[in-house]
Amino acid sequence: MERSSDKRTSGMADVDKVQAGEEPPIDSLATLKIESESASETANQRLVADDTKVAPIASGETQVQTWLSRAATATTYEERLVCLSQAANLAPEQSTVRQWIYETLKPFLNRKPFLRYVQENPILYHISTADGHTLTVPKDRTVSPPYPPTKPTPLRPAFRWLRLALLGLLIAGLGTLVCAPISAWLAWSVSQHSTDASQQKHARTVMVYAILLWFFGLILSGLFLLHLYGYR
C-alpha cells in the first residue's frame, strides 16, 4: 500500500513538473504511460459492460416500438416509410406495422407516383423509391397453396385412374369402361372418409367427370361394336 501511494504521489509530482515546464525523469514518463493505458483499458471495459447490459433491452419488441415511435414523430413521408420499413423487417406480421405502412404509402404515392420492384420473399416486398430509398412492405394477401400439391393427397390415385380413363377413349372407349368406374369409386371413398371440405369438393368433381367419361366411353364402344358387326 505504501509503494502504491508513493507511486501515485510521484506520478502527481511528475504531472506538476510537466505543467510547470520541467522535464520529468524517463522512468516517470514510462510510469505515466502505463497508468494512462491502464485507465483507458478500464474505461473500455466499462463501456463494453454497459453495452452488454443495454443490448438485450433494445431487442425484439422494444426495437419495433422504437421504430414506430420514430415513425410517429417523422416530419416527412420518406422518413416515416424508412422507419416503418425497419419495423416491418423485425415484425412483418404485426397488424400495426402493416396498417401504418399502407396508410403512409397512399399519400406518398400521390406526391411521387413511382416504385421500383427489387425482390420479394413469401411475406415481404422490397421496393425502391424515386429517391433511391429501399423500402420493405409486408404482403397483404394470403399465399395460395401450390397446385398440384407437393405432398401426395388421398385423391392422387383417383386422378391417376381418371387420366387413364381419358386415354382409354383412344381405343374406342374400351379402356374408359374399365378405368372410369375405378376412379369414381376411389373418389367416392375419399368424399366419405375425408374431413377436409376442399378434398370432398374435389372428390365429387372427380366422380362427376368419371361418370361422364364412362358414358362417353360406352357410346364409343357401342359405335365400335356396331361398326365391327357391320363389316360382317
Image: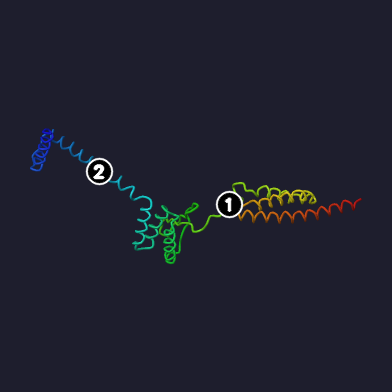
Locate residue 106, reporting x and y percent: 44, 65
For residue 185, side relative to residue 56 (left or right): right
For residue 107, side relative to residue 53 (left or right): right
Front residue (pair 185, 70): 185
Residue at horizontal 11%, vertical 36%? Answer: 5
Residue that extends furthest to the right in the rendered view of this protein: 232
Which residue position is annotated with label 1? 146
Q: Secondary structure at mark 2?
A: helix
Residue at horizontal 74%, vertical 51%? Answer: 181
Q: Amino acid at mark 2?
A: Arg
Locate residue 198, reporting x and y percent: 61, 55
Q: CA distance from mark 1 to mark 2?
A: 55 Å
Q: Residues within 10 Å of mark 2 (few under 14, many from 20)?
A: few
Q: In the image, is residue 75 above or below residue 92?
A: below
Which residue position is annotated with label 2? 46
Residue at horizontal 60%, vertical 53%? Answer: 196
Which numbered tag is attached to residue 213?
Answer: none
For residue 85, side relative to residue 34 (left or right): right
Q: Residues within 10 Å of mark 1 (few under 14, many from 20)?
A: few
Residue at horizontal 44%, vertical 67%? Answer: 110
Q: Amino acid at mark 1?
A: Pro
Task: Pick the quarter of the image with the N terminus.
Answer: top left
Locate residue 47, reporting x and y percent: 26, 44
| Contact (Cβ within 8 Å) of mark 1 with mark 2 | no
For residue 125, side relative to residue 2 (left or right): right
Locate residue 187, reporting x and y percent: 68, 51
Sequence-wise, the earlier of marks 1 and 2 is 2
Front residue (pair 2, 186): 186
Numbered disc total? 2
Q: In the image, is residue 135 above or below residue 5?
A: below
Q: Secondary structure at mark 1?
A: loop
